[in-house]
Image (cartoon, rainbow, N blue to C red):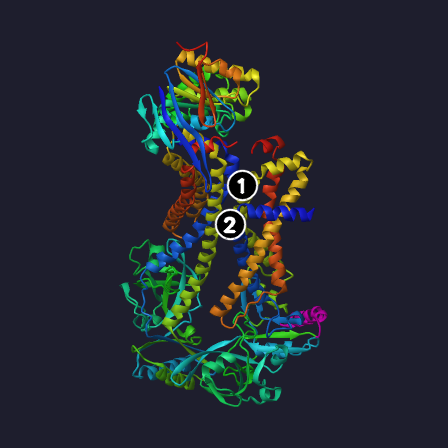
């Protein structure tokens, strides 16, 4: 029977070529959409790795009149003491401007002694940073101010970077290099999703705020007591404005996460809506063409009934034909789809593509099956005595 | 072989009821070659459909090979047609997208016969109708007579006890028609197939054993011809 | 002849209503997406409120310093100092608006927090941009020079800060820990127009940062308003001559670049399409057309499939036409016209749906204050897309139809 179907389809290849092309392109569209969805879902399933509730971000322009290193340190320490003394503030840290969920990023390439290379985000932090953000150490220790005096600067890397550079073997005590200097890894911190809940964990390297960076630092992270409200915030705002003297802004990390997530979700929702309409369109078209084909093949169906096919077997045959067409389309589609994991086109893990391919194949089969079901039923209902005498 | 008892068939539309067959009693013996004649709309095709189990009578009984058929399910009917009946149509009804050989083996396909056996039986059947050299052609590449031969090969490939032919020569010129008729006669004589043929052509009908005339859904004449089957 | 085609087309449409529905659904949906997209692009690109003079304006949004030896590059908006010294002094522009990019900051009112985007501007900004003042008036040259703490606020800010107060001109608003006197209230501008958008506009002279700092890079942009569109080349030439005299200030950098561009290229120049003579507009349009074509491919293929089914159904009609002397060309023409009629019908539905979709998008506040409209440009574009779609889905079936053999066609039914 399988061979019979194949002959039937092969001998009609010209008519079927268009249907196959349509299914093939539909597969590619579904593949693209499901790749994005699978990737986003996988990332979503990863633990956040940081606590963003009740963390506030203060952005300010570094005061232009404070120039010398001593005055910068003095200014920052005085401000820190004053803020930390406030009853609602649990902890304070200065940071580079690429705080979690911000639009800023700063990255560069790192290499190991044996020339393994990886791109990583560079974070400028202080001792209190992991405490404010609730980040957990995997091994080793966090950087401290006393690290600034050592000859080889100390850094902390995250687990993802440890995996990329050292294949997951303990990186503590080993060295990494930037273009300009050699750095010693003193600790490995657990991964944190700093680009949003649906974004992938990126490699990261954390380094203590040094005299170079201090002059340009304009970001503070504050861990607040839960439930601290706007009235305290306005007081804090006033105090900071007075002390700093330039324009400032206070943001809440949970709101930043929400807007960052929206930024990932909105394009995906648009894609789903457009893709959904395309699929409805294709499904209707497929249904229409299959249905039409039944009416064109009434004679053939009548004959099959006459020579001993039951209604159910005719209906089954038509559904099988459609699924067979889908299989041909999917084979072509798979040829293109597997190039993505093989050639690492978008630097996504292969398992994402594999899952997306699986989903898309299942989706196309189900779609085609549903579209063929009703025309198949119609075919089973064809009355052979009538169909055979229409001429 | 075929027994029809008081078969009636009426078609009902919204407003009118048409009687296609009105109390037909008919017995066809094993090995008999019966022809049915009558003007257009007299119900001969309906009769053939009922004998071929493609249609069910409104009243009456149809027995084939002693088997009562009115109570059979769709699936049972399909199996019965497949094993006991072969069909030949005026307009051939070949599947244009299949090659000749694939067309012929169609009945065997619904019978779970192995591919090799299907091919062998089909080749045999084609040889019998004289088309052994056209197996790889598509129907569109054949003449009308050749198409009908393919249809005959398809009808006999499963070695059914009964062959039903609905104006098999109706679309053919007289020379080709005669060829097809000879083939059917040969089939009847050599293989002992029971054949029921509907025709418009008196000359063709005269070559068979027995001629039944229908008018307005009723049997008006039934006589055995001189070449009657003993 | 065309009337005849039209009649046949309508008859065919009425014959198989389900197919007609599928065809129209596909076309309408495709056109809806294209139209909404076009409306969005048109909204961001064309001269809408308040930048109604875009056709005779040039934008300076970026300075570039390059280190050709080490391939180093430093891109940034200009400082106020640079724009004041080199751009305000240009002879050809009628007016030069200088404004900062919007700075996010906060305001606190009645125990609530407000995020406020603050923009520092000069006085000509209010003449170059045509803001609708709901009440009050812009701040003047004199007020800017005096460093008065006056502000023009957006309608949104008025609502968020003052609630339902009828009139707020002359009242005090406290933002970024500074008290400002409200000078006027303007209709809000969506964030898709970054040069004009802000929640509150104040004179650059009250900026907490030192605007006099003699450095090139900063946070300001300039809009040069010409007397007419014809002035633009002269303005560009004069600015280019000025830029040629400026030395890069960063150590090791040897090239200084900046362009005064029309609105669209001023943004595209900094994109991957960038650095061609037209600022990448041509390339961006090519890319857009390609994406659109790819998007239309699947619905078109769907329509091709349905069209072919329809043609096969009409094979006897085609046979008769051929038998009575219609040539292949005539039939191709007939079918393409028929398909265009069908597509056009679908387009009309699509455009109607777009109107609804755009109302929904405007109402849903996907982007604050954006107000998409279907104007002549958008309609024209949709019509072009409609024709392209009609041809894309009609040509192949028409060719198949013209090749049907007469005998075969007549015999088929």
Residue A83 appears at what percent x and percent y?
A: 34, 82
A235 relative to C244 in the view: left or right: left
- Magenta range is C227-247
Question: Is C239 within the magenta?
Answer: yes
Using the image as rendered, state which of residue A30 and residue C253 is in the foreground: A30
Mark sitting on residue C329: none
Mark 1 to mark 2: distance in Å? Answer: 13 Å
**Disc 2 is attached to a residue of which chain?**
C
Mark sitting on residue C309: 1
Using the image as rendered, state which of residue A166 and residue C406 is in the foreground: C406
Using the image as rendered, state which of residue A301 and residue C362 is in the foreground: A301
Sequence-earlier tag: 1 or 2: 2
For disc 2, the marked residue is C22
For mark 1, does the 10 Å Cα neighbourhood hold few (<14), some (14 to 19), or many (20 or more) residues? many
Q: Are marks 1 and 2 in contact (CB under 8 Å)?
A: no
Residue A358 appears at what percent x and percent y?
A: 37, 47
| Disc 1 element | helix
Q: Is A240 located above or below residue A300 in the figure?
A: below
Using the image as rendered, state which of residue C82 and residue A308 is in the foreground: A308
**Disc 1 is attached to a residue of which chain?**
C
Residue C28 lies in quadrant: bottom right
| Disc 2 element | helix
Residue A220 lies in quadrant: bottom left
């Amino acid at each position: 029977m399988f061979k019979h179907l194949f002959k039937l389809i092969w001998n009609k290849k010209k008519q079927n070529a268009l249907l196959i092309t349509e299914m093939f392109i539909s597969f590619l569209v579904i593949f693209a959409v499901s790749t994005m969805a699978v990737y986003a879902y996988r990332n979503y399933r990863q633990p956040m790795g940081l606590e963003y509730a009740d963390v506030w971000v203060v952005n300010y322009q570094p005061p232009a009149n404070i120039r010398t290193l001593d005055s910068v340190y003095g200014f920052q320490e005085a401000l820190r003491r004053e803020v930390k003394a406030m009853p609602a503030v649990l902890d304070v840290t200065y940071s580079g401007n690429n705080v979690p969920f911000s639009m800023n990023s700063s990255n560069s390439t790192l290499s190991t002694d044996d020339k393994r290379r990886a791109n990583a985000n560079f974070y400028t932090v202080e001792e209190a940073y992991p405490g404010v953000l609730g980040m957990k150490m995997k091994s080793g220790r966090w950087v401290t101010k006393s690290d600034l005096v050592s000859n080889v600067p100390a850094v902390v890397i995250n687990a993802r970077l440890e995996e990329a550079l050292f294949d997951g073997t303990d990186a503590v005590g080993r060295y990494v290099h930037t273009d300009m200097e050699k750095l010693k890894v003193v600790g490995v911190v657990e991964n944190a999703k700093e680009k949003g809940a649906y974004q992938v964990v990126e490699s990261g390297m954390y380094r203590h705020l040094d005299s170079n960076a201090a002059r340009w630092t304009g970001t503070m992270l504050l861990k607040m007591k839960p439930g601290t409200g706007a009235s305290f915030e306005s007081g804090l705002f006033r105090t900071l404005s007075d002390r700093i003297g330039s324009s400032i802004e206070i943001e809440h990390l949970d709101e930043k996460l929400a807007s960052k997530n929206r930024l990932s979700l909105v394009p995906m929702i648009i894609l789903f809506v457009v893709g959904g309409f395309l699929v409805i369109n294709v499904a209707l078209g497929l249904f229409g063409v299959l249905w039409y084909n039944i009416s064109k093949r009434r004679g053939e169906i009548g004959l099959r009934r006459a020579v001993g096919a039951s209604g159910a077997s005719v209906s089954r045959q038509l559904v099988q034909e459609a699924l067979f067409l889908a299989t041909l389309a999917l084979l072509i589609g798979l040829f293109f789809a597997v190039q993505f994991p093989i050639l690492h086109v978008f630097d996504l893990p292969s398992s994402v593509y594999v899952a997306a391919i699986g989903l898309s194949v299942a989706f196309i089969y189900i779609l085609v099956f549903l579209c063929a079901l009703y025309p198949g039923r119609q075919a089973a209902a064809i009355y052979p005595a009538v169909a055979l005498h229409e001429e | 072989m075929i027994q029809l008892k008081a078969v009636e068939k009426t078609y009902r539309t919204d407003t009118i009821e048409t009687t296609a067959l009105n109390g037909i009693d008919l017995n066809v013996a094993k090995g008999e070659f019966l022809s049915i004649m009558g003007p257009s709309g007299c119900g001969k095709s309906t009769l053939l459909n009922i004998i071929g189990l493609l249609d069910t009578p409104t009243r009456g009984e149809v027995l084939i090979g002693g088997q009562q058929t009115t109570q059979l399910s769709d699936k049972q009917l399909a199996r019965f047609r497949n094993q006991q009946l072969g069909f030949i149509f005026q307009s051939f009804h070949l599947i244009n997208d299949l090659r000749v050989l694939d067309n012929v083996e169609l009945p065997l396909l619904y019978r779970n016969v192995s591919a090799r056996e299907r091919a062998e039986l089909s080749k045999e059947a084609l040889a019998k109708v004289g088309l052994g050299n056209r197996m790889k052609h598509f129907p569109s590449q054949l003449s009308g007579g050749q198409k009908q031969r393919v249809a005959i090969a398809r009808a006999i490939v499963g070695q059914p006890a009964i062959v039903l032919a609905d104006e098999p020569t109706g679309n053919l010129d007289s020379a080709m028609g005669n060829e097809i008729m000879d083939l059917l006669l040969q089939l009847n004589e050599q293989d002992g197939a029971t054949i029921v043929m509907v025709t418009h052509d008196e000359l063709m009908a005269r070559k068979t054993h027995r001629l039944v005339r229908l008018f307005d859904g009723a049997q008006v004449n039934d006589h055995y011809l001189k070449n009657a089957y003993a | 002849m065309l009337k005849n085609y039209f009649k046949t087309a309508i008859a065919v449409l009425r014959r198989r209503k389900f197919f007609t529905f599928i065809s129209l659904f596909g076309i309408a949906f495709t056109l809806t997406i294209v139209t909404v997209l076009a409306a969005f692009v048109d909204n961001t690109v064309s001269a809408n409120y308040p930048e109604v003079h875009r056709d005779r304006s040039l934008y300076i949004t970026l300075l570039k310093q390059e280190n050709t030896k080490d391939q180093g590059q430093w891109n940034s908006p200009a400082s106020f100092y640079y724009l004041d010294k080199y751009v305000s002094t240009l002879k050809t522009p009628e007016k030069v608006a200088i404004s900062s990019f919007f700075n996010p900051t906060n305001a606190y009112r009645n125990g609530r927090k407000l995020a406020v985007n603050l923009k520092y501007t000069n006085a000509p900004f209010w003449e170059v941009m045509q803001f609708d003042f709901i009440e009050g008036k812009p701040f003047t040259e004199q007020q800017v020079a005096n460093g008065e703490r006056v502000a023009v606020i957006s309608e949104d800010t008025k609502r968020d800060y003052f609630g339902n107060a009828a009139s707020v001109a002359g009242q005090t608003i406290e933002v970024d820990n500074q008290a400002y006197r409200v000078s006027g209230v303007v209709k809000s501008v969506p964030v898709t127009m970054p040069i004009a958008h802000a929640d509150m506009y104040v004179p650059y002279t009250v900026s907490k940062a030192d605007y006099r700092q003699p450095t090139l890079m900063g946070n300001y942009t300039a809009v040069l308003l010409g007397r007419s569109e014809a002035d633009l080349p002269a303005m560009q030439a004069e600015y280019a001559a000025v830029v040629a005299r400026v030395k890069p200030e960063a150590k090791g950098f040897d090239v200084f670049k900046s362009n005064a561009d029309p609105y669209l290229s001023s943004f595209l120049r900094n994109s991957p399409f960038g650095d061609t003579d037209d600022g990448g507009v041509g390339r961006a349009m090519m890319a857009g057309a390609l994406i659109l074509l790819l998007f239309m491919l699947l619905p078109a293929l769907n329509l091709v499939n349905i069209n072919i089914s329809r043609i096969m159904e009409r094979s006897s009609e085609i046979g008769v036409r051929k038998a009575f002397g219609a040539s292949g060309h005539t039939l191709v023409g007939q079918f393409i016209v028929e398909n265009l009629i069908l597509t056009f019908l679908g387009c009309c539905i699509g455009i109607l749906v777009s109107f609804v979709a755009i109302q929904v998008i405007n109402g849903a506040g996907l982007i604050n204050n954006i107000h998409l409209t279907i104007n002549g440009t958008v309609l024209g574009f949709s019509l072009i897309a409609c024709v392209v779609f009609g041809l894309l889905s009609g040509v192949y079936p028409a060719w198949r139809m013209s090749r049907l053999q007469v005998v075969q066609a007549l015999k088929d039914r």
